Image: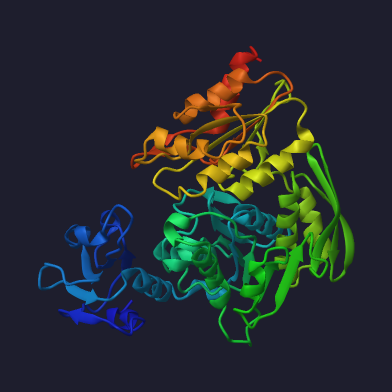
Amino acid sequence: MQATQLLQCLPIKKIIGTLPENIKDIAIDSRSVQPKSIFVCIKGYTVDGHDYAQKAVDNGAIIVVTERQLDLEDHIAQVIVKDTNRALGLLAAKFFDYPSKDITMFGVTGTNGKTSVATMIENILLGLGVRSAMKGTIGFNLNGILYASGNTTSDALSTQQMIFRARAEGCRGMVMEVSSHGLVLGRVAGVDFDVAIFTNLTHDHLDFHGTMENYGNAKGLLFSQLGQDLEKDKHAVLNADDPWSEKYAGLTPFPIWTYGLKNEDAMFRGINCQYHDHMTYFDMVTPDGTFPVQLHLLGEFNVYNALAATAALYCKGYPIKDIIEQLEAMGPVKGRMQQVSTKDLPINIFVDYAHTPDAIEKAITAAMPYKKNKMIFLIGTGGNRDKSKRPDMAKEASRADYVILTTDDPRYEEYESIMNDLEKGMQHDRYKCIGDRAEAVRYAVEIAEPGDMIIFAGKGHEDYQIIGNTKYPHSDGDIALEAAKRKFDMTNK
């Protein structure tokens, strides 16, 4: 692409040096720079891209986008902007020719349920024969093939690359989990969403946002960014049982579709809910009538998720009966109240991604119908992150018969610091603190008796643990199954 043409998307900038005629790529990692690239210096939590500008030049970068003038060779053009994160979003969208405009884009935001709702939408689309993609916590799923990726909402460059790839693969729909961090940091800049979906808002990420008001306002950006062009077929899907929905409804001029269980005015409503072993039954009230639904998913929160997914697809013209048929064919979402134990084991083992007080409460509530003996609940929380939610997490976990307090991704924080914060919220003395998560998982299995249920919360689908700045292999489910088979002498069965 012509350099001058690309840089037209940055209206406020200062150019030092002479721009080259063309550039062939954009990069934010100096190690991935190709010849004739533009390198954007991004400040991260632990690394500042400005420190790697020279390395990027050595690898072939010919333009550097920066927030300050750098000491580089005279033949390297420097484009100085106020915010390189924002600039990256504009540059990446233009470079890849705004790929989201050619795909129906679903954006899902909220504290809990993003992955489940996004997965449901994508699975329904695929089941209906619609080539689709999904980007979220579990990775990048393209036409049913899962690829590893970074944050829940990737950086703006990776986001545009994935949408571009989805378009090239013939996808007609794409679902994205949209985090509050991603919205505030401009990671979805240039993404033209068609349907914005809100799940709920509960205590989380206050280390980043400071207050619940700031956190809620950040989520609202998804709805305000739908724009004002009423010639476009755009929609907002809101949880009628969450008070934040009223505010979000006022942020967009597009049609509002509501769902819920408690608010009788919800357009999509779940009634007559029944929760049984491995199945959830309810009647779905819709604009087209009331339909019985049978889910192979556990808990009230999955009724909410199913309603949200249904509303999101219905507003884009998909028939209710087709949507429900695909919902009923779905299995558990990976790492979301997912049973990992085998039928031969005398204990039930579940893994879940719950890492907020609200999610822990919902996980325990969902599991109660299956409780035959004791419920053992393991929780941990990430180091160097929101500390204010820790006591509330343990308070909710106290509803279990026995609780194990451990770590999630400790990063640079001491085990004792994390567990001391959690311990402040415990409501009974039937608990144990074990900092090493793998050891804590094994201990949970060790104390379990036939008929017991163990829920490992916080990691869900993740197969790693972050200690310091390094990812180490770790899977709650694999560790627990190995320990359980050894405990119950099933290693050769």
Colour basis: rainbow
From the top left corner, tell me how far across and down residue 206 is, in percent: 47, 57
The N terminus sits in image quarter? bottom left
In the image, residue 452 sits, relative to residue 307, either above or below, namely above
In the image, residue 336 sits, relative to residue 31, either above or below, namely above
Drawn side of residue 60 relative to residue 280, left or right = left
From the top left corner, tell me how far across and down residue 434 is, in percent: 48, 27
Q: Quadrant of residue 347?
A: top right
* Residue ID at (44%, 52%): 150
* Residue ID at (65%, 14%): 488
The C terminus sits in image quarter? top right
In the image, residue 52 sits, relative to residue 256, either above or below, namely above
- Residue nearest the viewer, comparing 16 with 162: 16
- Residue nearest the viewer, comparing 273 with 168: 273
* Residue ID at (81%, 62%): 269
- Residue nearest the viewer, comparing 309 with 105: 309
Exactly how many numbered labels are in the figure?
0
Q: Quadrant of residue 469?
A: top left
In the image, residue 119 sits, relative to residue 289, either above or below, namely above
Drawn side of residue 124 relative to residue 469, left or right = right
From the top left corner, tell me how far across and down residue 332 is, in percent: 69, 44
Drawn side of residue 394 relative to residue 411, left or right = right
* Residue ID at (49%, 38%): 463
Whether residue 441 is visible: yes
Whether residue 460 is visible: no
Q: Quadrant of residue 409?
A: top left
From the top left corner, tell me how far across and down residue 420 is, in percent: 45, 36
